[in-house]
Image (cartoon, rainbow, N blue to C red):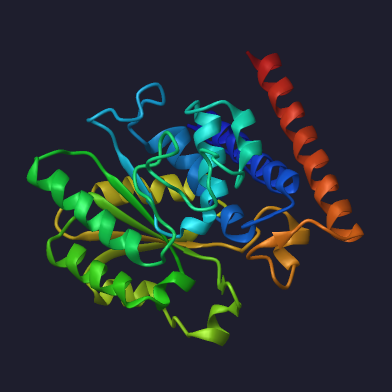
Amino acid sequence: MEQQYENLKLLAKKIRLDILEMLYHRGYGHLGGSMSIVELMSVLYGKQLHIDPANPAMEDRDYVVLSKGHAGPGWYAALAESGYFDKQLLFTLNEGHTQLPSHPDRTKTPGVDMTTGSLGQGCSSAAGIATGLKLKKSDRYVYLIVGDGELDEGQCWEAFQYIANYRLNHCIVIIDENKRQLDGYTDQIMKLYNVEEKMKAFGFYTQRVKGNDVAAIDQAIENAKQCHDQAVCIVLDTIKGQGIPFFEEMESNHSVKFSGEKIIEESEKAIAELKEQIRKEELQDAIVM
């Protein structure tokens, strides 16, 4: 298990590097919220998901609904690392006629199960998918990823009430609490208060874990899968821009423009450091093997 978690940490570094390289190449993009779900995506695509990249439409598959669709680059990087498409496609992000639009589109990108971006709507979509799977008596899971700023949308809470009422425990609700949204800190814009207690009050079995800890995330998912009589939720305590100190500390890191000497310098530095870390870890793995 320890080696498996080391592999997930390495995958997280690769996903983080992919995000940074594709956005740097494009010159702009949603960096902050993509970085805060990197470890989650590593655990999902490196261990938890029942999927087949060679057959994205496989009927007996788990589903991912990225309701915070602006974090599409984080999802695309995980899909590319999992073999859904060639990594070179990442550098077409946001181009005309690309398969990788700014927000996920199920008609364009292999591995994307639901079009998202209008915040709140992914919650209802995931609830619907989970209902369909329950009616079919399927034991497959739906992983719903929601942003904390997104919880300003009332539609999220309507969907949560539905999920809890019908005990859709195979819809694992994962809230990325990175404490910021488009225009600033969530506490300054619309106080969320204690989201863990709110989800418990709605009827969810709720866990809170550090969002940069692959072992803790994995264990929380395993715990959720053992809960059979109520809805389940995992609150990830994350940092917007997670994993790269310069971007963690940036005042406005929701969408970053890669212009200006300092940003370019720090971006290139982070890319070089991630590449070197990955190179050393892969070399170490080769020696051990």
Question: What residue is shown at x 40% (from left), y 55% (from top)?
Answer: 116
Residue at horizontal 63 percent and vertical 65 percent from the top: 254
Q: Residue furthest right?
A: 261
- Return the x and y of residue 214 as percentages of the image width and height: 52, 45
Asked if residue 2 can be seen in this view, the reply is no
Q: Is residue 208 above or below residue 91?
A: below
Q: Quadrant of residue 137?
A: top left
In depth, the one of 187 and 283 nearer the eye is 187
Left or right, 206 with reference to 45: left
Q: Is residue 51 above or below residue 244?
A: above
| Residue nearest the viewer, comparing 64 with 224 | 64
Query: In terms of depth relative to the viewer, which is nearer, 157 or 7?
Result: 157
Question: Toward which corner of the image does residue 14 lie, by quadrant?
Answer: top right
Marker count (numbered):
0
- Residue 156, relative to residue 54: is it above or below? below
For this orientation, the residue located farthest to the front is 96
Give left or right: position of 58 versus 131.
right
Tell me if I can see residue 116 in this picture: yes
| Residue 139 in the image, given as x and y percentages of width and height | 18, 39
Q: Quadrant of residue 19?
A: top right
Query: Vertically, is 151 above or below 66?
Result: below
Locate the C terminus and report the quarter of the image it occupies: top right
Q: Position of residue 20 (x, y in %)?
A: 70, 46
Q: Is residue 221 left or right of residue 215?
A: left
Q: Position of residue 102 (x, y in %)?
A: 55, 52
